[in-house]
Amino acid sequence: MRPSMILFALFWVLLSAWPAEAARRVSVVATVPDVGAVVAAVGGDDIALVVMAEPTQDPHFVDARPHLALQLSRADLLVAVGLDLEVGWLPRLQVGARQPDIQVGRLGYLEVGPFSQLLEIPRTRLDRSFGDLHASGNPHVMLDPRNAARIAIGVADRLARIDPERAQAYRDRARRFKVESDRVAAAWQARSRAIPLERRRMVTYHRSLSYLANWLSIEVVDTLEPQPGIAPTPAHIKDVLARIPAMGVPLLAQEPWYPERVADLVARRTGIRRVTLPVLEDATRSDAYMLWVEATARMVCGGLEL
Amino acid sequence: MIAFGVPVAIVAQAPAQPATVPATAPAVGPAAGIDRELEEALGGDAKVLKGRVVPVMVDPGPVGGPPGPADDGGVTTSPLMPWPTGQGGGGGDSGNPDLSFILDVAAAMFDTERGRQLGAHDPTEAGFNLQQLELSIGSAVDPFSRFDGNLVFSPFGVEIEEAYATTTALGSGLQLRAGQFLTRFGRANATHPHTWDFVDQPLWMGKFFGGEGNRGLGAEGSVLLPLPWYVEAVGSLTDARGASTNRSFLGTRLAPPRTPLDLLATGAVKQFFPLSRDWSLSAGISGATGPSALGARDRADLFGTDLYLRYRPLEAGDPTVVTVLLEGARRRRQGPGLLLEDTGWNLSAVWRFDFRWGVGLRHEEVSGLPGDPLDPAWLDMRRRTSAQITFWPSEFSRIRGQVSRDEGAGQAVGHAAMLAIETVIGAHGSHAF
């Protein structure tokens, strides 16, 4: 056989092998790392996962960089929190991606926030004099492994619809995830409840740790933001400075994307312990969620304990 | 648990299952041979819908998940429903479109008789100016398209700035728009004043297109090219008339187009490079060609380029955003016995150094021509330099102070100072990068 024919044959072998390789994995895009980590746990090696927001990025304010639309244009499934968390950046990217399958209302678009037991659903007439409130409830649902378990099951259902050949694998992984979530949830609840009630109090930067507080039975006494989405003001910080000693609040906790200067000032003035919660590194690893949520619980419980 | 009594059929997605997903339709069971039956029942539509019909039936409870109802938080999913369902909270949308009002008002001072800004919504009067009250509307029309509109209220009446439909279901990276829209020539033209860093419109846009920017009734097609990096190609045909939108083309001429050559054709290629997590670069080239009002069968052409560099560190809690934009265009117009060529550009840098504070600097140059019937007094290079400082009380409002120095174009040096306030209420859609 002549070399050119060998090359020709090799070309066709490679070409026919390539789509078969690609066909093995469902392409999934998750908007934020914590959701991505749950998707990774459910999808395992059967999916190719891309996460849009960086782990140190405020999920409210992600730049709608056009290459994210390019990622969406190749996706079979887009998983978002919903509840208006990504409303400032995702819709434009979805339309710009020109991928019909991942548009709102399609099988390839899944909002997972509503799977959670939602907190802080406004029961009053809402306007922005309350700050940037979310009308459907607090969207920061991921810092509670019980919510993550519900979300895992929802994600498994959707993946099973899109990729029925591996439906059982997705559901099995979701079950295992739920078992592990239940264990983690119970273990840290037990540790938290061993802390005296009057010490189970914290101040946060934004109203984004409500689910963590609900899980671990902690009272969020105040936030550094006077209202959701409104940057700290001197008058409000003065109030916070007075409230912390008055209520004996031992911990100030905030996510890594919020500025630390104000928190440092509060810590310096009041002697409160200040922690920046762990960054969710490498959300595409199937154990990333549990590592992160346990590290967070460890940090918070450690901060509350004497 | 809510039970839906009426079976509904949802027509999901436009293209067939993506190549990367394994085939989903089993060869046996109730769905076997459905294609032929569908084709018989629906005729030609079956070809379009083939493999894409997802019947949604009553599904009263959780399916396929291990937890019981006690642990599902009252919210569950069904393999047959593409959205979570359940009791209490959430949802609650009556199907109304997203509506928002944006108010721009400014106080201005000039050392000339009037402000020399060219934008139709720029502050040009000494004292208080109502720049605009914009009503922005957007919603999905159906699973195949969406509608977006911007109505602008001013002391002179209501203006349909934009109203267009965009397809969302064509697939293959294609998208169509139809209606009245701002063309995608360059970077700034397709945007509205509330996304601008500076209070007034760039000079070159005002001189080449008009105070409203280039827009018109028409249709646009665009494609996201299947390349490893972001490349979007856009082409549109729009009405070439309008004194404040198409002044280089037919301008005030009222006669309707007789041939396609009487329309404005605009094309652009837009590329984006995520240089790193923190650095972004977008680069575009644009061209527009249309009939010129200078004479019968005369043409006017524009060639533009835009380069936008953005630095936004994603390190924890860093509010910094630095952007640099270079944008400009060269215009070439034929007329009876004359060929007019001129150039305009602006270079701006904006630095947001705090969550609430930012500053910006912009320099613009636009050349002038002897014998230009559109701008007979604009004989030499006009230069304008502006500086602004912005305070954001929240993400829904901003207060800007801006000063500028303007010289050339046959006029004495002029200075302007403006204090502009912008507020946004309602549900406002996300903006392009």
Image (cartoon, helix red, strand yellow):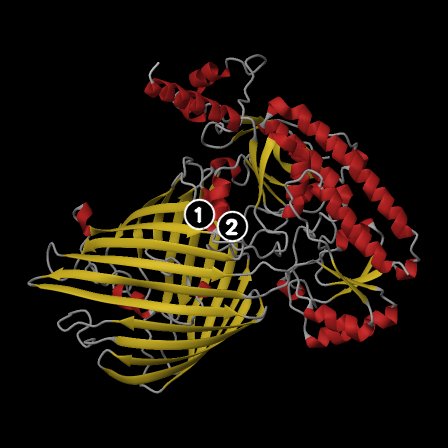
Chain letter of the residue carrying label 2: B
Please name the residue shown 65% across and 68% down the image. Answer: A231
Q: Which residue is mark 1?
A: B147
Q: Which residue is mark 2?
A: B97
Q: Secondary structure at mark 2?
A: loop
Where is residue B420 shown, x and y percent of the image? 47, 75
In the displayed structure image, the side of residue A6 where residue A185 appears, left or right? right
- Give amino acid for label 2: Pro
Q: Secondary structure at mark 1?
A: strand
- On the question of residue B63 being in view, the answer is no
Examine the rendered structure and indicate whether residue B312 appears above or below residue B235. below
- Give amino acid for label 1: Phe
Q: Quadrant of the N terminus of chain B?
A: top right
The lab-note entry on whether marks 1 and 2 share a chain reads yes
Where is residue B135 shown, x and y percent of the image? 46, 60
Whole-number angstrom distance, CA of label 1 to CA of label 2: 9 Å
